[in-house]
Amino acid sequence: MENEKGYIYAINGPVVIAKGGCSFSMLEMVYVGKQRLVGEVIKVSDDGATVQVYEETSGLKVGEPIYKTNQPMSVLLGPGILKSIFDGIERPLKVLEERSGAFIATGLNVSSLDEEKKWEVTITCREGDELSSGQVYATCPETASILHKCLVPNGVKGRVKKAMPNGSYSIHDTVVELEDETGNKTELTLCQKWPIRNPRPVKERLELCKPLITGQRVIDSLFPVAKGGAVAIPGGFGTGKTMTQHQLAKWSDADIIVYVGCGERGNEMTQVLEEFSELIDPRTGAALTDRTVLIANTSNMPVAAREASIYTGITLAEYYRDMGYNVAIMADSTSRWAEALREISGRLEEMPAEEGFPAYLPSRIAEFYERAGYVDSLCGEKGSVTIIGAVSPAGSDFSEPVTQNTKRFTRCFWALDKSLAYQRHYPAIHWMDSYTEYFDDLIPWYQEHVSPEFPSCRGRIMHILQEEDKLQQIVKLIGADVLPEDQKLIMEISRLIRVGFLQQNAFHAIDTYVPIDKQLRMMQVILHLYDRGMELVRKSIPLSQLKETGIFEDIIKIKYDVRNEEIDKMESYRQRIDTLTDEILKNNE
Ligand SMILES: Nc1ncnc2c1ncn2[C@@H]1O[C@H](COP(=O)(O)OP(=O)(O)O)[C@@H](O)[C@H]1O
Ligand SMILES: [Mg+2]
């Protein structure tokens, strides 16, 4: 049966006005024009609707039909998501490319997931079992490292009437049949749909208690984000937003990575892909791409699909969370997403608020970040979605609306600093402007899994950095020479922390990822040098004697000299500090 339809009354870039013939509902997916471009209803009126179109609209003509689907804009969930590259509305880019030759064509209705591929399915329920929404009825190895769990769709429950034997099935094969009390039957395949703008339901939201360990010292040791938390990475052009997100995608201890390239350059996405296919996941030994899904809506692609891309991304993330996985989603950059929102709003002739953004910008940002969380899922597993959103304020001006609103809804803030980046201090996460409100909740984890001393070490390191910051003001005015020796020591140790600990080279084989134990040992060595240095200061022995030994420079090089698997070597640094200071003490007796 031909779907009900209206017709195109007006076209304004990605926005199309529909009139006549049928009633549209809010957020309904529609097919626009003869080419059947994918669109979504964003406003309804008495005699029609306003539609945002996710594809290039230049070929559309007034009078062409607009077909209803009676369904909200949804994504297809099922095995085959991982390792894929999708556009903003979950169309596989590879398939599109092969079929049309161009980077992305319009109106091609391809399935999001491979419909032919057979999966080795284990049916986990038996005839007679009672199943309800979110429970697992089948599993299959999706990639070498990830077991896909098929979850009963929302709103469906019943007794298993029929369960197929284990075997190979494709996503649309029925593997289980449910029957509810009233005799209604539901056929369960390996896949289901979910409307992208609705958060998926959970049994319970849990307190955050575990950090997302990233192997990046300034993050794990000073400003950790909790699994299930949300963090903003604001930074001007070239300060390292993309680099930081790539590092997290590569090294963080999430089970699944959803990487949304949103309005940024296309070659960066290609780069992620190339790098990831070469890298091995240190925890599973499998390829890094096995746990990754990429959503690319780069700067050359239609603007409305960019608006949708972060919802598509977060929905995929929630789906894997519901299976009990820890998922991290990176959005690079949410500013480009906000700009898409602004462009569409402008075309709708809505009243602009701050800097031309629509008045609903804050609520949209909030809705996105609120989908982060650590939860008890409906199938009884614990899973999390951690959101890492890059923000690109023009001219590094953090007072602009996207940065400010993002700050309101995230509890962790990695402020990238232009002058640090300029000095090539990377990651350019500024220790004075950044913060995390998660640390207190994570203290028990650090104490149990790293060391009881971890929180106090972190506290002392932060304190030294703060002291240095205050002293810098004085030094600027009157120079460093006049500082008393104890303050000079602060300056020296602080430099050690900045250069030897906070700076971390993503391109260096050893330094690119550092386990948390080694991070602690590095902090301890630095603090030990500080303590022993203080001992000299108290005895009025000039610091220069300690500096001349070269120990400061040696400690700065620990990150390159001590391999991650030989952290026991760290003890020798401690001993050297003791030998050197003991000697100096003796010589000054
Ligand atoms: N951790 C790092 N280690 C080494 N170099 C870095 C690091 N972070 C950023 N850089 C350098 O900064 C450049 C710009 O970073 P990028 O992430 O592309 O910036 P942005 O996305 O903020 O525009 C990178 O190409 C790289 O040379
Ligand atoms: Mg970038």
Image (tube, rainbow, N blue to C red):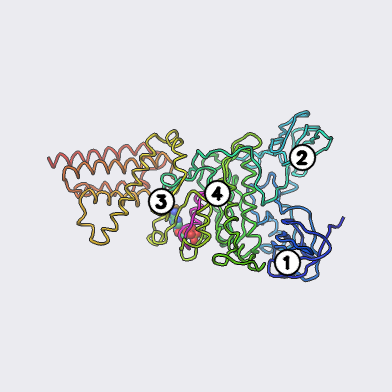
The mark that comes first in sequence, 1 or 4, is 1
Number of the front mark, 1 or 2:
1
Assess disc 3: are there few (<14), some (14-19) or many (≥20) residues with their C-alpha within 10 Å of its C-alpha.
many
Q: Is residue 501 left or right of residue 31?
A: left
Q: CA distance from mark 4 to mark 2?
A: 31 Å
Q: Which residue is mark 3?
A: 504
Find residue 188 and name its label.
2
Give the residue type at disc 2: Leu
Q: Which residues are magenta?
A: 230-249
Give the residue type at disc 1: Val
Q: Are dots 3 and 2 in contact, CB under 8 Å?
A: no
| Residue at the spot 60% in from the left edge and 64% down from the top edge | 342
Q: Which residue is mark 1?
A: 16
Say above or below: 484 vs 63.
Answer: above
Q: CA distance from mark 1 to mark 2?
A: 36 Å
Residue 316 in view (yes/no): yes
Q: CA distance from mark 3 to mark 2?
A: 49 Å
Q: Which residue is mark 4?
A: 387
The mark that comes first in sequence, 3 or 2, is 2
Number of the front mark, 1 or 3:
1
Instruction: From the viewer's side, name the closer residue of 369 and 186.
Output: 369
